[in-house]
Image: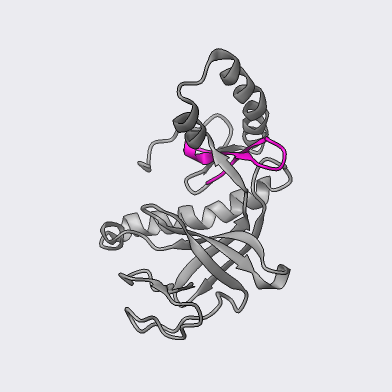
Amino acid sequence: MSYCFNPSCQKPENPLGTKYCQSCGTAIALLKNRYQIIRPLGQGGFGKTFLAADTDRRSANCVVKQFAPAPGMQSNPQVLQKATELFYQESERLLQLDEHPQIPTLFDYFEENSCLYLVQQFIKGKTLLDELEEQGIFNEQKIRELLQDLLPVLEFVHEHQVIHRDIKPENIIRRQVDGKLVLIDFGVAKQGSGTLLTQAGTTV
């Protein structure tokens, strides 16, 4: 499949090898002459997330985030500016925290065709939301195991003066290779300063 990166394209999926999007006419090529999109992973108010292959790393899987704010954000300059800052700050947070094995590594950050992109490590596994839907309500032992694995990650994050601000089951992946929990999506993470960790301002 070839994927169109025009954020406003209504039908971005195209047959493999397509040079121009059949829906909007945008030229289709590797992002940064390197990243080949495989399929979309999700979409939120700030943009879209894709599974991609890094052709410079023998087509190893990675995650590409495209900053493509919703129309409501684009019509509000203040909100758009704040959203842009948060997207940029995600790369800063990942750089700060990438030495921890349970936080995805940042590989790249760039701008192309007036869009911002962030490329990070792909974590193969299921989210805690997937587990919850498959297994039902977690018992006490399961919850204790989750906390014992996850709390040291949060301790590391807080030691670096970062507040995640979006901890939820779908942002925690159980890595398939070793069963460890990985904390993802630092898109709305905040830099703390001293004790002023809850200043009023942005509603997320």
* Residue 167 seen: no
166 drawn magenta: yes
Residue at 55% over, 74% down: 31
Number of residue marks: 0
175 drawn magenta: yes
Residue 33 higher or lower than 117, as above or below: below
Residue 203: quarter of image:
top left
- Picture coordinates of residue 24 (x, y %)? 32, 80
Residue nearer the viewer, 154 or 138: 138
Residue at 30% over, 57% down: 73
Residue 68: quarter of image:
bottom left
Residue at 44% over, 84% down: 27
- Picture coordinates of residue 12 (x, y %)? 38, 71
- Picture coordinates of residue 162 (x, y %)? 58, 39
Residue 167 higher or lower than 98, as above or below: above
Residue at 48% over, 31% down: 134
* Residue 178 seen: yes
Q: Which residue lies furthest to the top in this view?
A: 140
Q: How is the image coloured?
A: one colour
Residue nearer the viewer, 126 or 197: 126
Residue 174 higher or lower than 15, as above or below: above
Residue 22: quarter of image:
bottom left
Q: In this view, does 169 lie to the left or right of 109?
A: left
* Quadrant for the C terminus in the image: top left
Residue 31 higher or lower than 148, as above or below: below
- Picture coordinates of residue 69 (x, y %)? 36, 60
Q: Is residue 110 left or right of residue 12?
A: right
Residue nearer the viewer, 130 or 167: 130
Residue nearer the viewer, 174 or 69: 174
**In the rendered structure, which segment of residues is drawn in magenta?**
164-185
